[in-house]
Image (cartoon, rainbow, N blue to C red):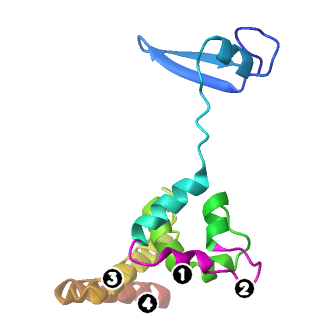
Amino acid sequence: MNCNVCGVNEATIHLTEIVNNQMVEIHLCDTCAQEKGTDFKTHFNLGDLLMGLSSLDQANASSEKRLAKVCPNCGMSYEEFGKSGRLGCSECYEAFAKMLLPLIQRVQRATHHLGKKPTKISRSVRTTYDLRLLQDRLRKSVDSEEFEKAAMLRDEIKRIEDRLKKGKKK
């Protein structure tokens, strides 16, 4: 996309503004943006953001110990991950697990993929999905020692499993 001002150079700065409920887009090249006296370069670094988020959870750990951790497979250090924002290989997840889990939890709100269920699914698939969710809630209730809630969930799971067994016998 070319610059709206000079019409020659490739636009590298894209501004969107909403004025009177109408969206106005302006596309500028670096030269025209400098001529207009605007400096849009923010030098945003994903690695710095990730290190900042993880350092909140790692405040108690000594930074030397944290940064000295190295992946045994690819040799990437946690410090290098912080600078680039990318892991070197799949084994980095295991090597840096203690430091990554709080970070992943904060960014993604969960440490594992929950997925979505389609709106139009068969009853048996929906029941199986609901059963898995109940089993997960049961585990969490037991872990947090909410035994009354766990007992109610256990009973609900039993009812669903009995229904499934009766359906298979027919």
- Is residue 124 something one can see in this rendering? no
In three-dimensional space, the C-alpha distance between marks 4 and 1, rounded to whole angstroms, equals 53 Å
Residue 52 visible: yes
Instruction: Give the residues drawn in magenta, as a range.
Output: 59-77
Relative depth, front residue between 91 and 125: 91
Nearest to viewer (mark 4 / mark 2): 2
Picture residue at 53% right of the left edge, 72% below the top = 100
- In whole angstroms, how far apart are the C-alphas of marks 4 and 2? 48 Å
x, y percent for residue 84: 67, 59
Tell me the residue that label 1 is attached to: 65
Please indicate whether residue 32 sits to the left or right of residue 126 in the image. right
Above or below, 8 against 127 in this view is above
Tag 4: amino acid: Lys
Q: Earlier in the sequence, mark 1 or mark 2?
A: 1
Residue 19: give x, y in percent of width and height. Answer: 44, 12
Q: Nearer the viewer, mark 3 or mark 4?
A: 3
Element at badge 4? helix
Instruction: Look at label 2 and name its amino acid.
Output: Pro
Residue beneath disc 2: 72
User: Gap between marks 1 and 2, in whole Å?
Assistant: 16 Å
In this figure, which residue is indicated by the disc labeled 4?
A: 165
Measuring 47% from the left and 91% from the top, which residue is drawn there?
169
Would you name the residue on which mark 3 appears?
140
Task: Report the amino acid beneath label 3.
Answer: Lys
Q: Secondary structure at mark 2?
A: loop
Instruction: Place residue 75 in its image quadrant.
Output: bottom right
